[in-house]
Amino acid sequence: MMTILSEQQAKKLLTKVLKYSKAESCECNLSGQLSGNIRYARNTVSTAGQVSDITLAVQSTNGLKTGVATINEFDDASILKVVRRSEELASLAPDNPETMPLFGPQKYIKTKSYFDSTASVTPEDRAQAAEDSIAPSKKNKLISSGFLNETVAFEAIINNKGLFAYNTATNVEFTVTIRTEDGTGSGWVTRDFSDYSKLDTAEASQVAIQKSMGSVDAKAMEPGKYTVILEPAASIDLLRNMAFSMDQRSADEGRSFMSKKPEEGKEGGPTNKLGEKMFDQRVNMYSDPTHPDVPTAPFANDGHSVGRTDWIKDGKVVNMPNTPYWANKTGVDYKPTTASGLQFIMEGGTESLEEMIKNTRRGILVTRLWYIRQLDPQSLLYTGLTRDGTFYIENGKIKYPIKNFRFNESPIIMLNNIEAMGKPQRINGCMVPTMKIRDFTFSSLSDAV
């Protein structure tokens, strides 16, 4: 069976699945993907492969009991089997008091998340992309290790309340680490796009080559608080962890940085910080399935429609992600994220990276943060390491490479200490600007290159 079904093919198959259902409520999720990859290490291609699969998940609900079964066979007997299995599992499941009714028909906005350029990538294209990274590395006597993976996928949802959703999407991801032969210099770069024609592995590799050669003979600096320039790869994980921690229920139940303790001696009142100004005035974060650089499906995992949603506006938290159950329980609107996860776009400023360096008297340029771990969910304090190119800036110029640091920092504090922002760039399916941050805390040195 083909793994990428058209809207008509997916609807025909899912309609057949529903006809077998005897449950009060039945929801079916069908997803398929065709992806290809190439991996290289020590300047030589080591693996290349292709993945092709399609999966059907059937969720049956009777009363407060729900069962889910999945299958990747699609003859009539197999479809009947998976439907009956989900109903049997529902009969055995304990009552779930948070069961909510399925949504009815929805209206979806149009998004352009599919590009022929990505869907038509061949093994020869991947080999050329790898060669464009390996050849300049060899020429500079450097060692490159990279991975490229492109995917074309579809997802479709149907239920017996009249809802049907369908979307196709493409994505390509490229990452390379380039090191000096003696292992004392390292550079790294990542790129991801929906449109393969935007990927230039030669251009990306050149960035890693320059960082690799420029980070040799790194000097040690005293840990402490420094003004830092964080490239998008250096802040994306901290920002995404913060975005994932904005869930309304976690806050209401006192489990997150968005929780609000009741005033002493008073009962009731808000249990979360919705509407409070928590960040610099210039911080704006939102989701938008129609964004041209980070398009996504216009629906959530339950098929509910999703449009542009502001999460942080002018430094204030204006919306928090929640579930239908929690929204209903607390009397607020349901605010879902897209089926592909919490995509966010952070607005930026106008300063280029070069201008930020030029305008810095004393600071540190950070390529990326790595091995990030949470220290405290209430303050969102994280620790981790800088890696693959950390440089000291003095009087507007990069002075020399420095040894890596361990950091202890919270994105909440970080977003209150913004000095400048650049134009947002796509990274890991989100849009993040380069940021200049004051008083970023480095707690100790790291010997890692």
Image (tube, helix red, strand yellow):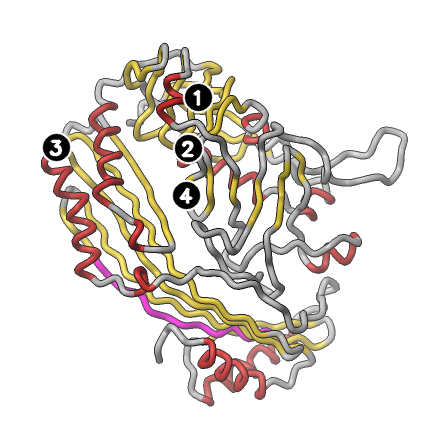
**Could you say whether the residue bearing mark 3 is in a helix, strand or loop?**
loop
Q: Are marks 4 and 3 in contact (CB under 8 Å)?
A: no
Label 1 close to label 3 by CB (< 8 Å) = no
Q: Nearer the viewer, residue 435 or 29?
A: 435
Q: Quadrant of residue 328?
A: bottom right
In the picture of the structure, the residue carrying the numbered disc 2 is 234
Q: Examine the image and state in which quarter residue 112 appears.
A: bottom left
x 46%, y 16%: residue: 226
Mark 1 vs mark 4, CA separation in Å: 19 Å
Residue neighbourhood size for the residue with mark 2, other residues' Cα within 10 Å, grouped as few (<14), some (14–19), many (≥20): many
Instruction: Measure how far apart labels 2 and 1 are at the Cα level.
Output: 10 Å
How many neighbours does mark 4 have within 10 angstroms: few (below 14), some (14-19), or many (20 or more)?
Answer: some
Would you name the residue on which mark 1 appears? 228
Q: Is residue 219 magenta?
A: no
Residue 140 tag number: 3
First in residue order: circle 2 vs circle 1: 1
Q: What secondary structure is the stretch in magenta mostly built from?
A: strand
Residue at mark 3 to residue at mark 2: CA–CA distance = 26 Å
